[in-house]
Amino acid sequence: MSNDTINAVERHVTPIADDFGVELVDIEFNNGVLKVVIDEEGGLNSQTLVDMTKAISRMIDAEDPVPGKFTLEVTSPGVERPLKKPAHFQRAIGAEVSVKTEPDVEGERRIEGVLAEANAEGIRIAAEVGDRSLRYGEIRTARTVFHWGPAPKPGGKEKNHKKKESAST
């Protein structure tokens, strides 16, 4: 899908998102799936996702901004949120992030660390190898990083519980 098509979809979806009081985070088109990512302060509920999907589907039927067949997916950003706009970066200050730079940017292309600063021009990441500053135009992709807690040990409490039961019989 061309940038023109994504821009056309964005022009039509933005007022719908505004009407629902949600933020349009991102629009992607990959492998026949038009993915519209929305968010709401305090988190989205399933009814908002259902209602937004219906409203966007009606708009697509009426305006036909996307050529060909595709599947519409309206979703929340999830726990690892994409960072696309300066406001996204500003909300993520203090969070661990993963950033991939454009190919022509000097230095390592993949940077992981804590987002220390975000302003109108760019960001600063506190990484293990030192701080790295980037302008927004130097960033290809960025997202927050969520670390799951340690996995439960195999045969943990449930196993001990079974031993107690068999000992008492």
Image (cartoon, rainbow, N blue to C red):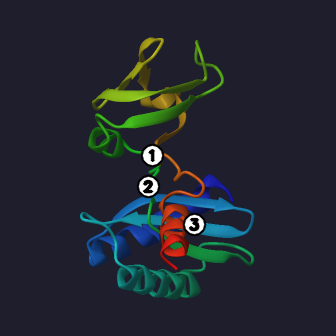
- Amino acid at pointer 2: Val
SS at badge 1:
loop
Residue under pointer 1: 146
Question: Which residue type does callout 3 highlight?
Answer: Lys
Q: How far across and down, in percent of the image, does residue 164 sit? A: 48, 68
Q: Quadrant of residue 14?
A: bottom left
Q: How crowded is mark 2: few (under 14 residues within 10 Å), some or many (20 or more)?
A: few
**Horizontal and vertical percent position of residue 13:** 43, 71
Near mark 3 (Cα within 10 A), the count class, few <14, some 14-19 or many ≥20, is some
Image quadrant in which you'd find residue 132: top left
Image height of 34 relative to 146, above or below:
below
Circle nearer the viewer, 2 or 3 = 2
Which of 143 and 11 lies nearest the eye of the viewer? Answer: 143
Against 27, is 45 above or below?
below
Looking at the image, do the residues carrying marks 1 and 2 touch, with CB atoms under 8 Å apart? yes
Lower position in the chain sequence, tag 3 or tag 1: 3
Give the residue drawn at x 67%, y 56%: 2
The residue labelled by disc 3 is 35
Secondary structure of the residue carrying numbered label 2: loop
Instruction: Residue under label 2, please give it.
Output: 79
Dot 2 or dot 3, earlier in sequence: 3
